[in-house]
Amino acid sequence: MRSIWTGHITFGLISIPVKLYTAVSSHRVEFSMLHKSTGAHIRNKRVDEKSGREVAWDDIVKGYEVEDGQYVTFTHDELEALDVESMREIDIDAFVEISDIDPIYYDATYYIAPQEGGEKAYHLLVKALREGEKVGITKFAMRQKEHLAALRVSGDMLVLETMYWPAEIRSPDELEGLDKRPPVREREVDMAMDLVDQLTGPFEPERYRNTFEAHVKAAAKEKLAGHEITVAEDDVDREPVSDLMAALEQSLKAARAGRKPQLPTKAAAAKREDDGDATSAGSKGSKDSKGSKGSKGSKGSTGSKEPAKRPHGKRWLLDHTKDELLEIAQDEDVPGRSKMSKEDLVEALAK
């Protein structure tokens, strides 16, 4: 792993030579821009807006706008010279309780490792922060930008969390709805706490996966195989909860059974109303036909319907939980389903 910054952590008269390393790497789905007709890549160019000509990197400088349309230019060396001390030092200004920091301030995470000769002081700081349950607050410069940061312990090493400056945090005062506080009954609070307790457990990040990336890969595979991708109708407009207690009771019942309840949508609610109207009309019609004299052929009719066909392909299956996939596999009599993982169930049902 290559370091992105070298310098010193300082507090009091102690100076620790360290290196910074990026702690995370993004795995988000990347799309290329292509020409719709030819499939060729679309390239972005650095163009001088006056001449219309492309400009090489060597001919580009950074400009700071002091007035409308008036810029002062800086070279890389000039920017480096603006604050030499913070460019090479992580100077701890104070130690605070980690609970004092609202997570909204955190931005990016970096690993910190000691350089040769700084190992003892490094691990001394690790032990002091861990046993004192404290976080160091500092500011330092990196990539021509000064950062507010928190120095904390993770395992047996130091981690640096860059933070947003207070002026960068937007105030929620203008958000709509926060000023409305309908009364909440004690029974509702107790039920909500029971639901939280039922769903409480250790944080297991490996349980979670990027389903959008899986959807894209599955859709790309199906398109390569010549299948048409069906665009699902947007049905995420949730129906507001009209009976909070009933919703809490159903949620708690589902949590105790180890399954995830399906959130109601406006479209689903409308369909239930239509189905209810149709059922009422059908019941009325059956009652009328039962009393009529001329209905000879209705005796042998069972009224059975063909089972509805489920959508084809992995994309639809990936939206389901493992328990839901097991139910589908049971309906389709998939052999060995009880020992399958979610991924195995998707593969088996996609065939």
Image (cartoon, grey):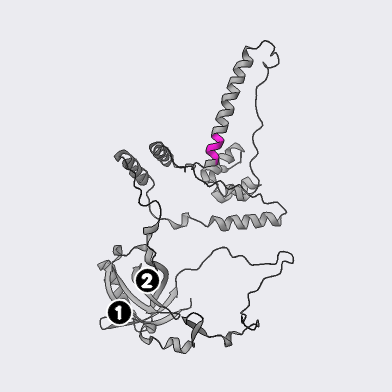
- The local crowd at label 1, few if under 14, some if 14 to 19, many if 20 or more residues have their Cα within 10 Å, is some
Q: Residue furthest front?
A: 68
Q: Looking at numbered disc 1 in the image, what kind of residue is underneath it?
A: Ala
Q: Which residues are magenta?
A: 267-272
Quarter assignment of residue 90: bottom left
Q: Residue furthest top?
A: 293
Left/right of residue 332 with respect to residue 95 in the rendered view: right
In this rendering, is residue 222 above or below 192? Answer: below
Per the image, is 321 magenta? no
Q: Which mark is residue 121?
A: 1
Residue 124 visible in the snapshot: no
The reply to whether dot 2 and dot 1 touch (C-beta < 8 Å) is no
Instruction: From the image, give the main secondary structure of the stretch colored magenta.
Output: helix
Residue under the image location 61 percent in, 65 percent down = 31
Q: Looking at numbered disc 2 in the image, what kind of residue is underneath it?
A: Trp
Residue at mark 2 to residue at mark 1: CA–CA distance: 29 Å
Residue under the image location 29 percent in, 75 percent down = 125
In this rendering, is residue 26 above or below 203? Answer: below
Instruction: Look at the numbered disc 2 and give the secondary structure of its residue.
Output: loop
Left/right of residue 239 with respect to residue 36 in the rendered view: left
Please name the residue that numbered disc 2 is placed on.
165
- The local crowd at label 2, few if under 14, some if 14 to 19, many if 20 or more residues have their Cα within 10 Å, is few
Q: Which mark is residue 50?
A: none
Quarter assignment of residue 306: top right
Residue under the image location 58 percent in, 38 percent down = 330
Residue 312 at x, y = what percent? 66, 46
Residue 87 at x, y = what percent? 39, 83
In this rendering, is residue 266 above or below 51? Answer: above
Q: Along the polypeptide, which appears first: circle 2 or circle 1?
A: 1
In this rendering, is residue 85 above or below 348? Answer: below
Instruction: Look at the numbered disc 1 and give the secondary structure of its residue.
Output: helix
